[in-house]
Every structure is written in C-alpha cells, then in structure tokens.
Amino acid sequence: MQLFPNENKVLSSDDDGLILTNQRIYMKDKVWGQSYIISIFLEDISSMEVMYKSYIIFIILGAATILFSLYVEENQWAALSLIFFLLWWFTRKHTITIKSDGGSPLFLKVGDMSDDRIEEFVYKVSLAKSKRMTDLNRQS
C-alpha cells in the first residue's frame, strides 16, 4: 500500500493485510484464490459491528444424539454427536464488520483475538475517525 502525502500508519496487522492510517482503513486479502483490496476513508465509515456467530443447532443435535446413544446403548450415535460438536466448533466465526456509506463493507475475521484486543482495535478506528473528522472540519 502506498501512503498519501500527510498520511501516517496508526496500526497494521502482522502481515500488513490490514492497515489503519490517519485517513483510511485498507485491507488486502485472498479468499478461495481470488484477491481483493478494500479501502475506506475514515469519514465514510458509517458503523462498526463486532459479532460472534455460532450455529447452536449443532450443539442441540450433538446433545440429542448423546442422549439417544445412552438410551439405545449404541456407540455410532455417540460418534455422530462428536461430529455435531466438531461442526459447531469449526463453524464458529468472530468478525468485525466496518460499513461505509454506499460502499462495500469490510469484514475482518478476528479468530482468536481476545475481547480486549478487539475492543482496542474498534477504539483506535473510532479515535482515528474522530481525529479525521475534526481535521476535515477545520479545513472547511
């Protein structure tokens, strides 16, 4: 990523796939062999959302098959319950969505980041946007 004149990095991910500057947030990623870049100017951010999503149906099915396997005393049902629990575990998602006015949203998979680090990231983006808006208002 090339920085604009008077643009400074505020923070970046370890692989520079995500960069927050004093003017914009920039993300470069690859999904299923396709690469993409999203750049949103801070003044265009309309909202940020932190969401933890899991499919509770897999937990329910896992618990039901465990109870059923105890009732019929057959181990294949216990194996099926393990599959349901693994499906629940591997389909869980923790994401931050940054929405822009009229543009594509930016989806960040935060994986194993702690809640404190996620809160710190959201705070830094909000602070950078606030400073950017103050600077733009001074110029006009």
Image (cartoon, grey):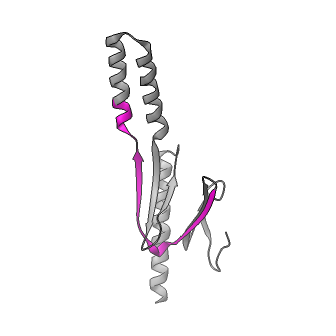
Residue drawn at (49%, 72%), measured in percent from left and top? 42
Residue at left 44%, top 16%?
Answer: 76
Q: How many marks?
A: 0
The N terminus, quarter of image: bottom right
Instruction: Examine the structure image and report whether residue 24 is included in the region drawn in magenta.
Output: no
Say if 39 sits above or below 97 in the image.
below
What is the magenta range? Answer: 34-60
Residue farthest to the bottom? Answer: 140
Q: Residue, x 43% and y 35% (percent of image)?
A: 88
In this rendering, is residue 123 above or below 39? above
Q: Position of residue 121 (x, y in %)?
A: 50, 57
Pick the front one: 74 or 62? 74
Q: Up-down: is 74 above or below 36? A: above
Q: Position of residue 81 (x, y in %)?
A: 41, 24
128 or 15: nearer the viewer? 15
Q: Is residue 74 visible?
A: yes
> Which of the 4 image quarters holds residue 56?
top left
Q: Nearer the viewer, residue 56 or 122?
A: 56
Say whether residue 20 is left or right of residue 119. right
**Along the horizontal axis of the image, is 66 left or right of 107?**
left
Q: Position of residue 136 (x, y in %)?
A: 48, 82
| Residue 53 vertical position relative to residue 124 in the rendered view, above or below | above
Image quarter of residue 64: top left
Q: Is residue 37 magenta?
A: yes
Q: Main secondary structure of the magenta part?
A: strand
Residue 20 visible to an observer of this rendering: no
Q: In percent of the image, x 50 and y 69: which residue is there?
A: 128
